[in-house]
């Protein structure tokens, strides 16, 4: 299995631009998680899906952030408009059933820089 | 609100030494606790998962313990190697849905 796939690996954009991050979970996994990692705040859960349905989006910072999971093999995290404080590494993770007993498998991350 | 703290923030040891990383959490109502490893520029890799009903888990040279009542967990690494150099994060699952709350991590450096 290729593991969790994220694209792009690096993104540099200017303030005000729209940014779309993509994730392909491990085949057969029913839950998908989006995290953000910064030096100041560490690793924070933004949103997670179970069977393509958003379960908890309480970590999404504001309306500029949106996430979708149109099918079991693809998810996007969109930031519109982007701001310099959005600069971070964004990780996607997936797990088999989305319960606390499952191991989460992380992708390599997307390093976002907003100038 | 659940808070997870890891001490120390950084640790440097000579090769071969046994070491302990610490993790504490403020709310003992957890479903499980997990330890992850993160290499520079990479994603996280799960090392050990301890269910709330368990006291410890072992994998090779790694042993993780959990004391829910005191809100503490330790990760013991035996006979450390330079390849163990990485950041180690602990995370608690605060509900059945798998939502994880992470500590800030301990950056470990094992010197040859």
Image: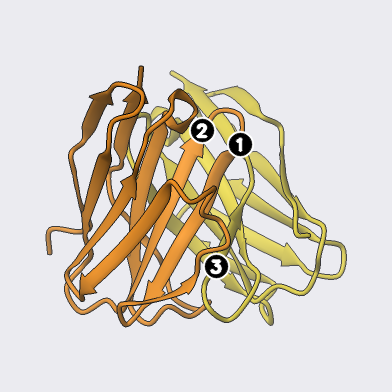
Chain colours: A orange, B yellow
Residue name at image x 50 percent, y 62 percent: B48
Q: Are marks 2 and 1 in contact (CB under 8 Å)?
A: yes
Residue name at image x 51 percent, y 24 percent: B109
Q: Is residue B21 visible?
A: yes
Residue found at the far left of this picture: A1
- Nearer to me, A41 or B12: A41
Quadrant in the rendering for residue B69:
bottom right
Q: Which mark is residue B99?
A: 3
Mark 2 Cα-neighbour bin, 10 Å: few <14, some 14–19, many ≥20: some
**CA gap, disc 3 to disc 2?**
18 Å
Q: Is residue B80 visible?
A: no
Q: Which residue is mark 1?
A: A41
- Is label 2 in a helix, a strand or a loop? strand
Residue name at image x 53 percent, y 44 percent: A43
The image shows a total of numbered marks equal to 3
- Nearer to me, A55 or B9: A55
Tell me if residue A78 comes above or below residue A57 in the rendering: above
């Amino acid at each position: 299995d290729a593991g969790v796939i994220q694209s792009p690996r690096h993104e540099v954009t200017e303030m005000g631009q729209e940014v779309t991050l993509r994730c392909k979970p491990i085949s057969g996994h029913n839950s998908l998680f989006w995290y953000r990692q910064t030096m100041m705040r560490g690793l924070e859960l933004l949103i997670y899906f179970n069977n393509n349905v958003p379960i908890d989006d309480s970590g999404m910072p504001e309306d500029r952030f949106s996430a979708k999971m149109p099918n079991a093999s693809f998810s996007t995290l969109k930031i519109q408009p982007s701001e310099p404080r959005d600069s971070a590494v964004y990780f996607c993770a997936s797990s088999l059933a989305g319960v606390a007993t499952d191991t989460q498998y992380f992708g390599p991350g997307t390093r976002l820089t907003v100038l | 609100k659940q808070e997870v703290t890891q001490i120390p923030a950084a640790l440097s040891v000579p090769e071969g030494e046994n070491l302990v990383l610490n993790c504490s959490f403020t709310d003992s109502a957890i479903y499980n606790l997990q330890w992850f490893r993160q290499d520079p520029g990479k994603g996280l890799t799960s090392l050990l998962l301890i269910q709330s009903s368990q006291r410890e888990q072992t994998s090779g040279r790694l042993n993780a313990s959990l004391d829910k009542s005191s809100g503490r967990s330790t990760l013991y690494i035996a006979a450390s190697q330079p390849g163990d150099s990485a950041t180690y994060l602990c995370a608690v699952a605060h509900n059945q849905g798998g939502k994880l709350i992470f500590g800030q991590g301990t950056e470990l450096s094992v010197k040859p």
